[in-house]
Image: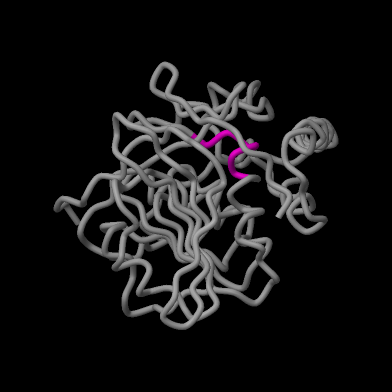
Amino acid sequence: MGIHRGVITIVLGAVLWLPSFACRGNAPSPRGSAVSPSASPSAPALQDTPATAARRSSLVSSIAFHVRLSPRVEQALLTVPRHVFVPPEYQGEAYSDEPLPIGEGQTISQPTVVAMMTQALDLQGNETVLEVGTGSGYQAAILSRLCKRVETVELLPSLAHRAQSALRAIGYDNVTVYVGDGYEGLPPLAPFDAIVITAAPPEIPEKLVRQLRDGGRMVVPVGPRDDEQHLLLLHKVGTEVRRTDLGAVRFVPMVRGRRVPD
């Protein structure tokens, strides 16, 4: 699959794939209510200029040094304007290869880790993908350029609304954001062709495996909070789930959902 192995470790609250590649993780909530775009706050009207495109191109060249990218994944990274998903105060760092705060104690994922996990899914273009942990919406935006639909679940309503607003603002209308419990997934919409999880459960979430179609792939970091974790690629073939270990990692824990206000 052309993915270099690395170790992900927590540094100052972020999750880093050494030497500096970071992920985020969300704690999902128990419901699966879709976010209405009309109820979402307006996303900043940020244009994609030749300058931002040039910065993005430089970033992708740097990522390609660490992750062997397929042409489709590379094009998605070149296409998605990361600055749209970054708060105004961090616009100057939008194309640095590092996590950035997005509020609520969360971060936008480091682009190299987004690329690594996306590459592992091996999307061909006609899939429906479940993402657990929406955050800023950046990972969902990348996925949306590579598949038919993205259904993504986020615990925090403020982040869910902001992500849906940003996605709509740039015309990515094949993504739906839900406020809900990631451990529960989205059973009414299953089975999914691929699932990506952005935080580490202590064990493979069997309920999510059941929502993966025959032949589908899941990328998930697995392991206890204070012990070694591994990034796993799961390939479901009939009743068998084949596992590929992509390397030792350290992600924030995936927390079971709790009830949140509507």
Which of the 4 image quarters holds residue 72?
bottom right
Tell me the residue at 56%/71% (across/down): 149
Tell me the residue at 28%/50% (across/down): 28
Q: In the image shown, does 193 or 262 lie closer to the viewer?
A: 193
- x and y percent of residue 108 in the render? 50, 35
Q: Quadrant of the C terminus?
A: bottom left
Give above or below for 256 relative to 66.
below
Task: Tell whether position 109 is magenta.
Answer: yes
In the rendered structure, the answer to whether residue 138 lies left or right of residue 256 reads: right
Tell me the residue at 47%/79% (across/down): 213
Q: Most extreme residue toward the top, as rendered?
A: 12
Give above or below for 142 relative to 213.
above
Q: In the image shown, does 148 or 83 lie closer to the viewer?
A: 148
The magenta-colored residue range is 108-114
Task: Tell whether position 218 is magenta.
Answer: no
In the rendered structure, the answer to whether residue 259 lies left or right of residue 250 reads: left
Give above or below for 252 relative to 80.
above
Q: Quadrant of the N terminus?
A: bottom right
Tell me the residue at 68%/46% (across/down): 3
